[in-house]
Amino acid sequence: MPPRASLRVIIAQDENAGNWYCRRPIGTPKSIRRFLTMFDNPQLEYLHIEPKDIGTDKIGHFDFFRSRFKDSLWQDCLMWLKSL
């Protein structure tokens, strides 16, 4: 069986961040969905997670890697990695 191709893209955007580079969208939901149409993988999955969805006021650019998200964001990624 050939290896399964996988792609996971994480884009963090804090709308109210004070830095100029955070106020500019990295990728809007519409542009991300358009980008994903470039791939033929039927296993493709798109998740849009807002901070309020996981009970916080912000996620932050690199804050995904902070231990405070081990029971929320990390769990989804862990399940995805185990499925490969």
Image (cartoon, grey):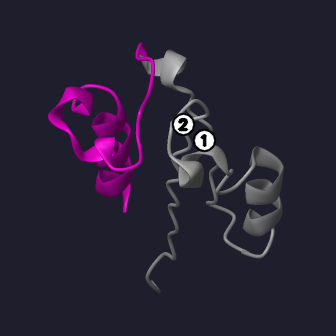
* Left or right: where 49 falls relative to 2: right
**Residue type at mark 1?**
Leu
Q: Residue furthest bottom?
A: 2
Tag 2–tag 1 contact (CB < 8 Å)? no
* Left or right: where 57 falls relative to 15: left
Q: Is residue 15 above or below residue 56?
A: below
Residue picked out by circle 1: 47
Residue 1 falls in which quadrant of the image? Answer: bottom left
Using the image, tell me which numbered label, if any, was put on residue 10.
none
Q: Is residue 3 magenta?
A: no
Q: Is residue 13 above or below residue 43?
A: above
User: Picture coordinates of residue 61 (x, y %)?
Assistant: 41, 48
Camera-nearest label, 2 or 1: 2
User: Picture coordinates of residue 84 (x, y %)?
Assistant: 37, 63
Q: Is residue 70 above or below residue 25?
A: above
Bin the neighbour count of mark 1 within 10 Å (Cα to Cα): few under 14, some 14-19, many 20 and up: few
* Left or right: where 23 falls relative to 10: right
**Residue under the point 20% across and 39% down:** 66
Depth check, front residue: 25 or 80:
25
**Residue under the point 76% across and 67% down:** 35
Find numbered disc 2 in the image and state the secondary structure of the residue it sits on: loop
**Residue under the point 67% across and 71% down:** 41
Q: Is residue 78 above or below residue 56?
A: below
**Residue under the point 64% across and 59% down:** 44
CA distance separating discs 2 and 1: 16 Å
**Residue type at mark 2?**
Asp
Residue picked out by circle 2: 14
Q: Where does the magenta region start and end? A: 55-84
Find numbered disc 1 in the image and state the secondary structure of the residue it sits on: loop
Depth check, front residue: 4 or 74:
74
Bin the neighbour count of mark 2 within 10 Å (Cα to Cα): few under 14, some 14-19, many 20 and up: some
- Mark 1 or mark 2, which is nearer the start of the sequence? 2
